Image: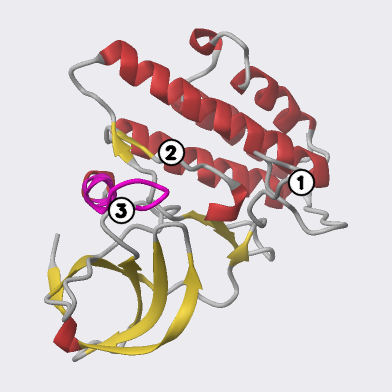
Amino acid sequence: MVRVPWAQLRVDGLLGEGASGHIYRVHQEGNTQGLALKLFKGAVTSDGLPEHELAACLAAGQHPALCTPSAELADHPHGTRGLLLPLIPPTYTNLASPPNLETCTRDLYAAGLRIPTPVALRLALGMAEAVAHLHQQGVMHGDLYAHNILWNPANGHALLSDFGAGTLLPADQPETSRALQALEVRACGCLLEELAEPADVAALKALAHDCMDDTPAARPTMAQVVQQLAGAAAAAVLGR
């Protein structure tokens, strides 16, 4: 990954904060494009180790539905580690807020949220494609929640962000790798179930049920989830 010196950056302001770091708007010397900079909070965060996130990002590569870093920060005056990411347009917003003590493991969606069927299916398909891409690259996102998804409500395009809990799948342990992928398929099922409520899409409900099968080996792969969602999206366009 390319390394960008701290001296080339101008910090314009804080954009937000996650479990593993603070996100700032920055400009790079000689670069007219706005960037975001994630500065890690410490050597160990509640999500994991910065080096694990870096390794996952390197292996993940680029995908239209992923918000992956473009460079690593170098020469911070305090030795703080960081990653440079694309600046997301203001038309994108978090799909939901993190869980609270009442919902525990489920995110909080805006009251009265309604999502048109084609928009919900595009969102779901994009996220499934992103996770399928990660699995193909040997990466587990590890934090597939709606609060880590930035979406454009006008058209349903979405970006999966925050690789703080990302990890490399053990290539030398295929059974463990498949089990971890099945765990992430279940997380996808929870997301589909949540999307099905404001969108009232039967295809999402049925697929969510399959993804959350009590037997991990019986769950579809992410590639199969993509196929089913692509079919549902095509059918919705044709009005079937």
Q: CA distance from mark 2 to mark 1?
A: 27 Å
Q: Residues within 10 Å of mark 3 (few under 14, many from 20)?
A: some
Percent position (x, y) of residue 8?
17, 87
Q: Amino acid at mark 1?
A: Thr
In the rendered image, which residue does mark 1 sit on?
Answer: 117
* Separation of marks 1 and 3 at Cα, in angstroms: 27 Å
User: Residue 76, can we see it?
Assistant: yes
What residue is shown with label 3?
62
Please state which amino acid type lies under the numbered disc 3: Gln
Q: To which quarter of the image does residue 211 belong?
A: top right
Does the magenta-highlighted stretch encompass residue 179?
A: no
Residue ID for mark 2 = 142
Is 8 situated above or below 90?
Answer: below
2 or 1: tag closer to the N-terminus: 1
Q: Main secondary structure of the magenta part?
A: helix
Q: Is residue 127 above or below residue 220?
A: below
What span is colored magenta in the figure? Answer: 45-57
Q: Quadrant of residue 208?
A: top right
Q: Residue at x 52, y 44 (%)?
A: 127
**Residue occupying the point 18% across, 18% down:** 172
